[in-house]
């Protein structure tokens, strides 16, 4: 299932009742590129913001770039690892990558608040982090231009049937290539941020 063929359900889901804006479908994001032929059944939530709600200032690069806590459910049987990628849907193609975590153990049910920068965060079993568009390994918070519209940040959680042959500091293309043909299901949580 991709963003474009979710039809009316996606249009309803992306209609922001706070601003009245309808958010555009995003085919250039990781979930659509590698998960277009599998169901998007993973439920992703955060205690720090609601779906299509504003992310906390502390989670932005204007604040402290503190990664928000994420929780997921409905991970399918046969999952051997989980990957998370956060992308700026409004930044073009390819999108700006704000966070990538791969090889998360399938028993993990989320990511804690404020995952530290670095290659292998100890509190997440099996996990390694990739390099963001700005060149750091770990979470890089939103930093849209001041005074502009709220931008969409897609936290995509992807269940895989294998552990990925990646090293810490991997790039987006490395992650997409490694995931191809191994996606069992995926889900997305969209957060907004404006300055």
Image (cartoon, rainbow, N blue to C red):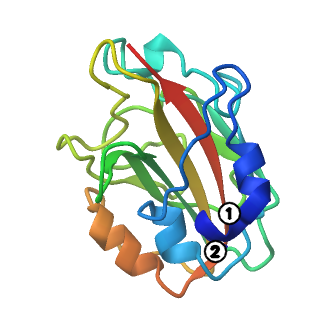
What residue do we see at 36% from left, 11% from top?
63
Q: Is residue 175 left or right of residue 185?
A: left
Q: In what element is the residue under mark 1?
A: loop
Comes first in the chain, label 1 or label 2: 2
Q: Quadrant of residue 39?
A: bottom right
Q: Quadrant of the N terminus?
A: bottom right
Location of residue 56 in the rendering, given as x and y in whole percent from the top left corner: 53, 15
Quick check: 135 above or below 1? above
What residue do we see at 66% from left, 71% from top?
5
Q: In what element is the residue under mark 2?
A: loop
Question: Pointer 2: residues within 10 angstroms few (<14), some, or many (20+)?
Answer: some
Question: Pointer 1: residues within 10 angstroms few (<14), some, or many (20+)?
Answer: many
**Furthest residue to the left?**
135
Q: Quadrant of residue 112?
A: top right
Q: Which residue is mark 2?
A: 80
Q: Is residue 35 left or right of residue 41?
A: left
Quick check: 38 above or below 46? below
Q: Quadrant of residue 148?
A: top left
Q: Which residue is mark 1?
A: 106
What residue do we see at 64% from left, 74% from top?
80
Do the CB atoms of the residues marked 1 and 2 lie less than 8 Å apart? yes
- Asked whether 155 or 29 is in front, the reply is 29
- Asked whether 52 or 44 is in front, the reply is 52
Quick check: 27 above or below 146? below
What residue do we see at 77% from left, 46% from top?
12
Q: Is residue 167 visible?
A: no
Location of residue 42 in the rendering, given as x and y in whole percent from the top left corner: 75, 58
């Amino acid at each position: 299932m991709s963003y474009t063929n979710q039809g009316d359900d996606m249009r309803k889901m992306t209609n922001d009742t706070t601003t009245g804006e309808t958010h555009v479908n995003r085919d250039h994001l990781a979930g659509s590129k590698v998960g277009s032929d599998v169901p998007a059944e993973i439920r992703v939530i955060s205690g720090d913001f609601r779906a299509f709600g504003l992310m906390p200032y502390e989670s932005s690069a204007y604040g402290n770039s503190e990664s928000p806590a994420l929780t997921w459910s409905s991970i399918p049987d046969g999952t051997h690892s989980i990957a998370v990628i956060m992308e700026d849907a409004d930044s073009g193609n390819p999108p700006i990558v704000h966070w990538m975590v791969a090889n998360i153990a399938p028993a993990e049910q989320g990511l804690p608040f404020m995952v530290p920068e670095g290659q292998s965060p100890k509190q997440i079993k099996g996990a390694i982090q990739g390099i963001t568009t700005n060149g750091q390994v770990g979470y890089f918070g939103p930093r849209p231009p001041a005074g502009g519209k709220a931008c969409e940040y897609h936290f995509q959680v992807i269940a895989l049937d294998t552990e990925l042959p990646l090293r810490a500091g991997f790039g987006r293309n490395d992650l997409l290539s490694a995931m191809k043909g191994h996606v069992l299901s995926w889900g997305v949580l969209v957060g907004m941020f404006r300055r």
